[in-house]
Amino acid sequence: MPRWISTTNRQPRSLQLGRTCMPNRSGNVAYGKPTNQSGTHREYYSSQGVDGILGNTSNSIQVCAHPKNPTNNAAWFYVDLGSVHQIFNVTVYNTHDKGGYDRMRRISIRVGNTSDLNEQVECNFHHGVVVAGGSFNLDCQTSGRYVSFRRTDGKQVHMVTICEFVVIGRPLAKGGENILLF
Ligand SMILES: [Ca+2]
């Protein structure tokens, strides 16, 4: 069976706890939003990177995104939040597959108001490795509509498996003002 992030709002438990510290309502603003990635390996569709399911050792193909860049350039993935959001942090969950887990290294997390990753600005960078089934979390204190992930170098730089891409943030009104949510 897939390993659900949560049975209520499908956010990691640790991040749900973080909500109590936020002045306005915030949460995983990436969940269920439109996505894209640099090519698709088998049936690892980009939408599965924001479907709220982490997967497990026997199930990743139906629950994880897996860019496989046909140009052999660095793999990328992004989520379109639909409007400009204030972003707090990003968590990326790696595959449980021991054959591919070590591709999750040297990752640029980027934010912008266009889907072109080259026009987005890097908000943080993950240097180290992530174990199979593990995750990394980075502060990403900025605002924007698109939040993306791009490998920068290393083994098979054109491929990576993203089982879930979680963006903690909240929507901003046009012009960047905060929206008071009830
Ligand atoms: Ca997933």
Image (cartoon, rainbow, N blue to C red):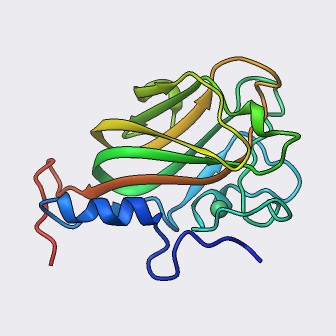
Residue 23 visible, this orientation:
yes
The picture places residue 23, in percent across and down from the top left corner, at: 12, 60
Q: Residue furthest bottom?
A: 8
Rendered residue at 35%/37% (across/down): 139
Q: Is residue 149 above or below residue 18?
A: above
Residue 61 vertical position relative to residue 149 in the rendered view, above or below: below
Q: As displayed, is residue 113 above or below residue 120?
A: below
Q: Position of residue 170 (x, y in %)?
A: 26, 58
Return the residue nearer the eye: 21 or 81. 21
- The total of numbered circles placed on residues is 0
Image quadrant in which the N terminus is located = bottom right
Q: Which residue is drawn at the image coordinates 46% and 59% (left, top)? A: 30
Task: Answer with the quadrant where ligand 1 appears in the image.
Answer: bottom right
Using residue 51 as the reference point, say whether residue 9 is left or right of it: left
Instruction: Name the image quarter holding the C terminus.
Output: bottom left
Which of the 4 image quarters holds residue 127? top right
Q: Residue at (38%, 59%) from the top-left corner?
A: 15
181, above or below 148, in the image: below
The image shows residue 80 at horizontal and vertical percentages of 47, 53
Closer-to-camera residue (45/160): 160
Residue 166 position in % (x across, y down): 48, 54
Q: Is residue 28 visible?
A: no
Left/right placement of residue 21 relative to residue 40 reads left
Q: Give left or right: position of 113 versus 51.
A: left
Residue at coordinates 70% horizontally, 50% vertically from top-left?
Answer: 133
